[in-house]
Every structure is written in C-alpha cells, then in structure tokens.
Image (spheres, rainbow, N blue to C red):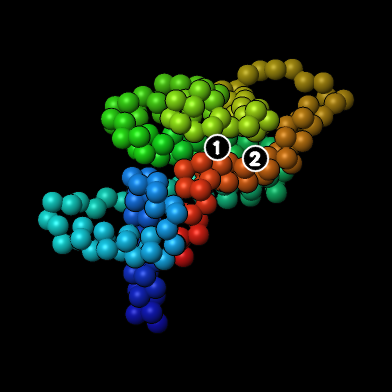
Amino acid sequence: MMKKKRNKMEAEIVDAFINSTVENLILQNPKLIKKPIEEIRQLALKELKKAVTDKNVKFVVTIDHTETLLKEARINKRRGDVELSAFWYATYFEHKINFLIHLAAKRLSLTKSTSQALLRKPKLEDKCTWILEILKIRQINKNHIKAITNISEIRNRYIHYKWNYRDMDKDANETDKILLQRIEKTVRYIISFEEHSLFKGIRKKARH
C-alpha cells in the first residue's frame, strides 16, 4: 500500500514538473500553441531530462495557494459568512491577477525588479486595466473589474474595521449577499481569461 502511494506521489510530482515546463515553453515560444498537445508534452519532457543532467540547473518549488483560497471562500459562502467569504474571494482574485501579471512579464522577459514593481505598486484596478495593456494583454471586462473591486471593499471593511452605524430594521448586508451570489461568474471568467490570454487554451489541454 505504501509503495503504491509513493509511486502515485512520484507520478504526480513528475506530472507537475512537466506541466510547469509546458507553461514555460509556451511563454518563451508562443508559436508552440499551433503544435499538437502530445508533441508539446514530449518536448517538455525532453527539456526536463536535459535539465536533470545539467549540474548548473537548480530546481525550485513554488506553492500555489489559489485553489485553497477559492475553497475557503466557497466554504464560508455556504455557511453564510459574508465577510469571511469576501475575504477569501478577494485574496483569491488578487493572487490570480498577480500571477497573470507575473506570467505576462515573464513572457516579455522583463527584469525581476520591473516585474516586482508591477506587482507591488499599482492599485488593483490599475492591474486589471492599463497594466495588462502595457503587458500586451487585453483589459479585464469592466463588469468583472467592478465585481472584484466590490468584493475587495467588503474584505477591506472586514479587515480594517470601521464603526459604521446600521439601521437594524434593514438588512445592511443584502447588497453584499447579492454580490456573493454572483461572484462565481467572475471566478469562471478570470480562470478562462488567464488561460486564453496567454495560452490560447492549450495549457489546460496539455495538462493531464
């Protein structure tokens, strides 16, 4: 049983490295998008084997928390916890948009300092609009930008608590609840936006 689990884990790790290499190859050479998926994966495997035997190549691992963030957002949404759900959704969107900028900067071979400045200095709305434009990516749809900024405002109210008075005869959270009910449309949009803006849908198909 332990051997099977270990073999499965090893296979998952190898697959993760291949997927990451596929991503890098497409970013470095967008023309690969036109090639058959299996050919891209075989090319990625060849590059990996070459890297393994090269003593100058160092492998680094990055932990991607975006799926965990989305999972927590959905769990708290089902529980009816508006503020906490908004916290996780807003953080999820920031991660996705930052990763998109990171990949786009990588594709254009921008310096590390420039890439970091693009991630740290602009406001969220700027990242969704003109920052993407200078990185040669179309801007995010205005309706979805509004949804992302609104969910971020709920998150900010929750973190930086402000002592606002409420009319107890009215449901002050009704607008927030409606926003949360509709937010999954923006989740699907952002996932599709990333995939098609940089990879034309090929990365998703190339992943096993």
Residue 132: tell me if it is visible.
yes
Decide if residue 32 is on the left or right side of residue 88: left
Q: Secondary structure at mark 1?
A: helix
Spot occupied by residue 36 in the image (x, y as percentages of width and height): 44, 62
* Structural crowding at the residue carrying mark 1, measured as other residues with C-alpha within 10 Å and reported as few (<14), some (14–19) or many (≥20): many
Residue 23: tell me if it is visible.
no
The residue most toward the left is: 55
Residues under numbered marks 2 and 1 in contact, where contact means CB atoms less than 8 Å apart: yes
Q: Which residue is mark 1?
A: 93
Would you place residue 22 above or below residue 181 in this image? below
Spot occupied by residue 129 in the image (x, y as percentages of width and height): 54, 25
Decide if residue 13 is on the left or right side of residue 150: left
- Can you tell which mark lies on residue 186? 2
* Structural crowding at the residue carrying mark 2, measured as other residues with C-alpha within 10 Å and reported as few (<14), some (14–19) or many (≥20): some
Q: Which residue lies at the image location 33% right of the left edge and 45% below the top edge?
A: 28
Residue type at numbered disc 2: Thr
